[in-house]
């Protein structure tokens, strides 16, 4: 009888340990979910809305799709990879408005920055990519060039200019003041 009791105690200790480990895993998962919700909550508390964007990354000369290109959304730190067609999935991004012009003429879109990497290609940085709340900007084409074909090892740095309708309206507004 005494010999069976230690085995039972050992088995019950093992069950307690396994149960405790499962409880830790479950609480860690719940913590992860809570963290995910809190990030969105922070955006929502600051009244940040969302739009989305999809990229197509291709070779700059042949226009061949580049798979496994790394696409980094600088504003969120999120990383995505292109598929065999050079496409990213639809990426949800916060609308971060440039409020400097609010008193003159507000910009009704948000702007994000993106960096794209692909082995053997020059890095590519795209700044001020315009995204509109609730809309998807599809097939934003990124042309990447092989390092061996480039005249310099410097990355490409592109700045997207403001929406032309907004620019035209801004110009008309100040032309009338003359």
Image: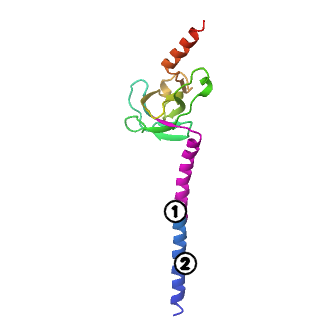
For the residue labelled by badge 2, is the local secondary structure a helix, a strand or a loop? helix
Circle nearer the N terminus (2, 1): 2
Q: Name the residue under label 2.
A: 13
Residue 43 covered by magenta stretch = yes
Up/down of 139 relative to 171, above or below: below
Up/down of 56 relative to 170, above or below: below
Whether residue 56 sits left or right of residue 111 in the image: it is: left
Magenta stretch, main secondary structure, is helix
Q: Residue 26 carries which label?
A: 1
Q: Indicate the position of residue 59 as horizontal and vertical percent values.
A: 42, 28
Q: How crowded is mark 1: few (under 14 residues within 10 Å), some or many (20 or more)?
A: few
- Asked whether the residues under the numbered discs 2 and 1 touch, taking CB atoms below 8 Å apart as contact, a structural biologist would say no
* Number of dots carrying numbers: 2
Q: What stretch is highlighted in magenta?
A: 24-52
Q: In which quarter of the image is residue 54?
A: top left
Q: Residue at 55% of width from left, 38% of height from top?
A: 48
For the residue labelled by badge 1, is the local secondary structure a helix, a strand or a loop? helix
What quarter of the picture does the C terminus occupy? top right
Q: Indicate the position of residue 104 as horizontal and vertical percent values.
A: 60, 20
């Amino acid at each position: 009888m005494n010999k069976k009791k230690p085995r039972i105690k050992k088995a019950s200790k093992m069950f307690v340990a396994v149960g405790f480990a499962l409880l830790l895993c479950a609480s860690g998962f719940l913590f992860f979910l809570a963290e995910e919700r809190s990030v969105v909550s922070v955006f929502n508390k600051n009244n940040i809305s969302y739009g989305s964007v999809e990229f197509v990354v291709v070779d700059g000369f042949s226009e061949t799709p580049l798979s496994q290109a790394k696409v980094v959304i600088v504003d969120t730190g999120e990383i995505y990879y292109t598929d065999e067609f050079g496409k990213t999935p639809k990426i949800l991004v916060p609308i971060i408005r440039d409020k400097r012009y609010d008193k003159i003429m507000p910009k009704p879109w948000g702007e994000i920055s993106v960096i794209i990497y692909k082995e053997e290609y020059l890095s590519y940085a795209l700044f001020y990519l315009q995204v509109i709340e609730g809309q998807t900007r599809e097939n934003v084409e990124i042309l990447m060039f092989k390092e061996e074909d480039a005249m310099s090892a410097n990355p490409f740095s592109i700045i997207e200019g403001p929406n032309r309708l907004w620019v035209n309206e801004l110009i008309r507004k100040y032309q009338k003041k003359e």
